[in-house]
């Protein structure tokens, strides 16, 4: 992976980090029916299950995730790196730790996976940054995560 010019503008970095946090929040709190709103119309989510190509496919994935009410999950994102990739496009990578617990009570959360999220962000006509591509690459995976 080649790294270009780092994004230094704090406002852009803050927007991208907020986008990443919103993605995790919607998944973690069963509010992901419209997860595709965070993606460009042709955006894709790869590696989190069957590949989702296009906003509606990402929404379908989000709806299926929102229906799983017996599972609690928390995505913790860290180590953000962003670099320029043209006038209205930025590439980025961050680490995502996934903790999960099943059941109605507070049970111990299991750290079940650590993944690298390789993202491409695009600034759309209205000036809003959206995800053009999110490619999840597992670095570590527990037996519980393999069993899904």
Image (tube, rainbow, N blue to C red):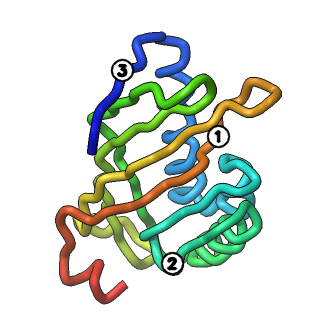
Location of mark 2 (residue): 70
Can you tell which mark lies on residue 5? 3
Q: Position of residue 47 (x, y in %)?
A: 42, 70
Q: Is residue 79 above or below residue 143?
A: above
Find numbered disc 3 in the image and state the secondary structure of the residue it sits on: loop
Q: Is residue 139 left or right of residue 106?
A: left
Q: Quadrant of the N terminus?
A: top left
Q: Position of residue 146 (x, y in %)?
A: 28, 84
Q: Is residue 123 left or right of residue 17?
A: right
Which residue shows up at 29% across the image and 47% down it?
95
Q: Is there CB contact under 8 Å for labels 3 and 1? A: no
Instruction: Report, in whole angstroms, how far the alpha carbon at label 2 lies from the one at label 3.
Output: 43 Å
Find numbered disc 1 in the image and state the secondary structure of the residue it sits on: strand
Sequence-earlier tag: 3 or 1: 3
Location of mark 1 (residue): 130
Instruction: Report, in whole angstroms, how far the alpha carbon at label 1 lies from the one at label 2.
Output: 30 Å
Q: Quadrant of the C terminus?
A: bottom left
Local crowd size for mark 1, using a 10 Å CA cut-off: few (<14), some (14–19), many (≥20) = many
Q: Is residue 10 left or right of residue 22?
A: left
Which residue occupies the extreme right position in the image? Answer: 126
Marks 1, 2: nearer the viewer: 1
């Amino acid at each position: 992976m080649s790294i270009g010019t780092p994004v230094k503008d704090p406002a852009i970095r803050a927007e991208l980090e907020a986008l990443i946090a919103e993605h995790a929040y919607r998944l973690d709190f069963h509010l992901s029916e419209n997860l595709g709103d965070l993606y460009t119309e042709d955006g894709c989510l790869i590696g989190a299950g069957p590949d989702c190509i296009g906003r509606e496919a990402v929404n379908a994935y989000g709806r299926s995730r929102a229906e799983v009410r017996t599972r609690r999950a928390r995505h913790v994102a860290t180590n953000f790196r962003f670099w320029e990739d043209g006038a209205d496009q930025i590439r980025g990578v961050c680490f995502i730790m996934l903790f999960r617990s099943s059941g109605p009570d507070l049970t111990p959360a299991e750290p079940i996976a650590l993944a690298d999220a390789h993202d491409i962000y695009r600034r759309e006509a209205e000036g809003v940054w959206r995800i053009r591509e999110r490619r999840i690459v597992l670095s570590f995976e527990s037996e519980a995560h393999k069993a899904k």
